[in-house]
């Protein structure tokens, strides 16, 4: 079924990656610039992510000896340095996820460069080196994003959904490229759990078993056809007391 199958290392049938978006209250402040201080309950919902979910997930993954990838906005790195240090201490990869979870395809080229630069500066200031990977907030990859990432030395992106296996994103008219690690909305837990009336999220709330049914179906297809299965999970959803810890390690935006 896959026309260009990949020979995965060590004879593996498929590739599986569990990735997380640690947004915290970054998008909340970007989207609610004039009303953020009045949405107290909603703000507490977004802060659950770094303050409660991240320590809980780190503990779960340490028990299972799992090292995963967390995409984090620069503003979150500045505001929650202890959580970043906790992730780094346990060997998790930290990718960049914008600065204030801005949607790059809704702002101009100059603004995209400005916010990307702020995110990159925050990352380097705290972690020393630049990130290897990037995920556009809300998957909002713009027509300028590839050039921005290449100029910054980013090695891979995980924002697009153009194949079932990793592929090269090549600069038009140039020789530069980076690796795309594609995902898909079916592998995102946001549609299952994101319900907050203050913020306009009205997804129907699913039981963990229902979400796992979708993720497992995607994994079964990857196993059968030798493709890539890359989940995008929100820490606040997959680690909460409302969600079984049995499902947490299996699965952020």
Image: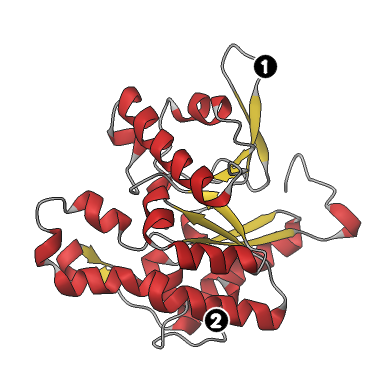
Q: Which mark is residue 58?
A: none
Mark 1 burial class by Cα count in 10 Å: few <14, some 14-19, many 20+: few
N-terminal of the pair, mark 1 or mark 2, is 1
Q: Secondary structure at mark 2?
A: loop
Q: Position of residue 177 (x, y in %)?
A: 65, 26
Q: Position of residue 107 (x, y in %)?
A: 28, 32
The picture quadrant where one finds residue 163 is top right
What residue do we see at 23% from left, 68% from top? 43
Q: Position of residue 125 (x, y in %)?
A: 50, 45
Residue 159 appears in view: no
In this figure, which residue is indicated by the disc labeled 1? 175
Given the current orientation, which residue lies at the most extreme top position?
173
Residue 147 appears in view: yes
Q: Is residue 242 left or right of residue 163?
A: left
What residue do we see at 40% from left, 54% from top? 78
Q: Is residue 161 left or right of residue 91?
A: left
What residue do we see at 61% from left, 43% from top? 129
Mark 2 burial class by Cα count in 10 Å: few <14, some 14-19, many 20+: some
For marks 1 and 2, give the CA distance: 42 Å
Quadrant the C terminus occupies: bottom left
Q: Secondary structure at mark 1?
A: loop
Whether the residues at callouts 1 and 2 have beta carbons within 8 Å, the answer is: no
Q: Report the coloring of the rendering.
A: secondary structure
In this figure, which residue is indicated by the disc labeled 2? 247
What residue do we see at 41% from left, 79% from top? 52
Q: Position of residue 65 (x, y in %)?
A: 72, 76
Q: Is residue 197 left or right of residue 83?
A: left
């Amino acid at each position: 079924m896959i026309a260009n199958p990949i020979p995965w290392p060590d004879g593996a049938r498929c590739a599986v990656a569990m990735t997380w978006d640690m947004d915290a209250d970054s998008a909340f402040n970007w989207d609610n610039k004039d009303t953020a201080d009045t949405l107290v309950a909603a703000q507490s919902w977004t802060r659950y992510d770094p303050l409660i979910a991240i320590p809980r997930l780190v503990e779960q993954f340490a028990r299972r000896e799992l090292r995963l990838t967390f995409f984090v906005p620069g503003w979150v790195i500045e505001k929650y340095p202890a959580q970043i240090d906790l992730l780094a201490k346990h060997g998790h990869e930290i990718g960049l996820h914008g600065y204030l979870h801005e949607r790059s395809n809704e702002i101009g080229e100059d603004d995209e460069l400005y916010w990307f630069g702020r995110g990159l500066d925050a990352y380097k200031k705290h972690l020393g080196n630049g990130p290897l990977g990037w995920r556009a907030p809300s998957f909002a990859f713009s027509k300028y994003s590839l050039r921005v990432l290449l100029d910054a030395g980013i090695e891979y992106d995980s924002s697009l959904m153009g194949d079932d296996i990793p592929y090269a994103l090549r600069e038009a008219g140039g020789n530069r490229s980076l690796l795309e690690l594609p995902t898909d909305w079916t592998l995102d837990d946001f549609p299952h759990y994101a319900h907050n009336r203050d913020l306009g999220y009205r997804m129907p709330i699913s039981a963990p078993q229902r979400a796992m049914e979708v993720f497992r179906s995607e994994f079964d297809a990857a196993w059968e056809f030798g493709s890539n299965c890359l989940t995008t999970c929100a820490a606040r959803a997959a680690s909460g007391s409302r969600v079984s810890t049995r499902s947490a390690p299996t699965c952020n935006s």
